[in-house]
Image: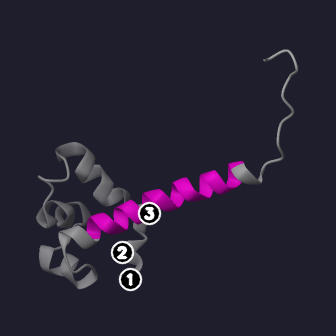
């Protein structure tokens, strides 16, 4: 895989999925957003499923980073009156 897998955090694919849904999004739709041929998309990904797995990994990576940042913060002291 090349920089295509990291381009805009997969936003190019996420937009297609949000607009028409996972089941209806085709590799041709994704290729159109990327301004390339579907055959060229397959140079970077084995299948539509591989593209969506990459999108899921990218999204979960962002969630994981946010969770780690929250966990690293010092604990706040709770107010004794908030029982």
| Above/below status of 48 relative to 22 | below
* Quadrant where the image shows the C terminus: top right
How busy is the neighbourhood of tag 3: few (under 14 within 10 Å), some, or many (20 plus)? some
Q: Secondary structure at mark 1?
A: loop
Say whether disc 3 or disc 1 marks the residue closer to the N-terminus. Answer: 1
Query: Which one is in front in this view, the residue at disc 3 or the one at disc 1?
Result: 3
Is 43 within the magenta? no
Numbered-mark total: 3
How busy is the neighbourhood of tag 1: few (under 14 within 10 Å), some, or many (20 plus)? few
Q: CA distance from mark 2 to mark 3?
A: 13 Å
Q: CA distance from mark 3 to mark 1?
A: 15 Å
Residue 66 falls left or right of residue 61: right
Residue pointed to by mark 2: 4
How busy is the neighbourhood of tag 2: few (under 14 within 10 Å), some, or many (20 plus)? some
Q: Main secondary structure of the magenta part?
A: helix
Residue situated in front as seen by the camera: 5 or 73: 73
Residue 4 falls left or right of residue 77: left
Range shown magenta: 51-70
Q: Position of residue 44 (x, y in %)?
A: 28, 81
Residue pointed to by mark 3: 58
Residue pointed to by mark 1: 2
Q: Are marks 1 and 2 in contact (CB under 8 Å)?
A: yes
What residue lies at 17% left-to-right and 62% top-to-bottom?
Answer: 32
| Above/below status of 19 relative to 41 | above
What residue lies at 82% left-to-right and 42% top-to-bottom?
Answer: 75
What residue lies at 17% left-to-right and 46% top-to-bottom?
Answer: 20
Residue situated in front as seen by the camera: 29 or 52: 52
């Amino acid at each position: 895989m090349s920089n295509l897998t990291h381009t805009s955090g997969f936003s190019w694919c996420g937009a297609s999925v949000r607009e028409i849904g996972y089941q209806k999004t085709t590799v041709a739709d994704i290729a159109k957003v990327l301004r390339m041929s579907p055959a060229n998309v397959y140079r970077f990904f084995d299948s539509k499923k591989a593209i969506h797995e990459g999108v899921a990994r990218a999204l979960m990576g962002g969630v994981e980073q946010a969770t780690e940042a929250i966990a690293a913060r010092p604990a706040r002291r709770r107010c004794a009156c908030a029982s």
